[in-house]
Image (tube, rainbow, N blue to C red):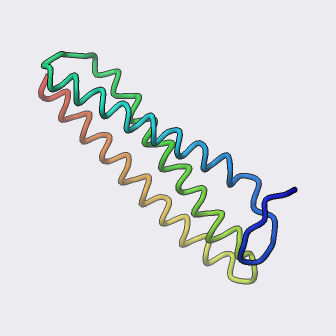
Amino acid sequence: MPDRSQKNNLPSHPWRVPLLIAEFFALAILLGSMFIFSGLARDGATFDTGWLLIPAVASLVVFVSFIGLMYLRWVAASEAGSGTRQKVVFALLTLTLLGIWAFSIVQTWSSITANS
């Protein structure tokens, strides 16, 4: 039996479940790596900065899957008439979110390498 949305009894988009799984799996990896790294920092242990790619990639997957779910909710679900305007606004929102993510990763990486 296909998954149906409760609001209008239409089948949900086929990408919804994989995006949700990816988002929560990456969120678990992100939180787990933050817990492990905070324990290492508390103990005074040093580790290679390459290990920070794990939370960076996990946070990117969380952002991308969140953006994909927003696209399914805002743009793909309302393809009636004003699709172009919604796609432009969504593209600007996507660029803003990914720009903020990239800026934070660069700032984090530069502060770590400056302290080393």
Question: In the image, residue 74 lies at what x, y percent?
Answer: 61, 71
The quadrant of the rendering that contains the C terminus is: top left
The quadrant of the rendering that contains the N terminus is: bottom right
Q: Residue at position x 53%, y 39% from top?
A: 25
Question: In the image, residue 98 lies at what x, y percent?
Answer: 44, 52
Q: Residue at position x 61%, y 44% from top?
A: 21
- 95 on left or right of 105: right
Looking at the picture, does residue 23 appear above or below residue 39? below
Question: In the image, residue 13 lies at what x, y percent?
Answer: 75, 59
Q: Residue at position x 17%, y 16% from top?
A: 45
User: Based on the displayed image, in which of its 4 quarters is residue 49 positioned?
Assistant: top left
Q: Residue at position x 84%, y 57% from top?
A: 2
User: Based on the displayed image, in which of its 4 quarters is residue 41 positioned?
Assistant: top left
Question: In the image, residue 43 lies at what x, y percent?
Answer: 14, 20
- 78 on left or right of 58: right
Front one among 114 and 74: 74
- 94 on left or right of 18: left
Looking at the picture, does residue 72 appear above or below residue 110? below
- Residue lying at the far right of the rendered structure: 1
Front one among 45 and 112: 45
Front one among 97 and 20: 20
User: Based on the displayed image, in which of its 4 quarters is residue 113 positioned?
Assistant: top left
Looking at the rendered structure, the number of numbered marks drawn on it comes to 0
- 64 on left or right of 112: right
Looking at the picture, does residue 86 appear above or below residue 27? below
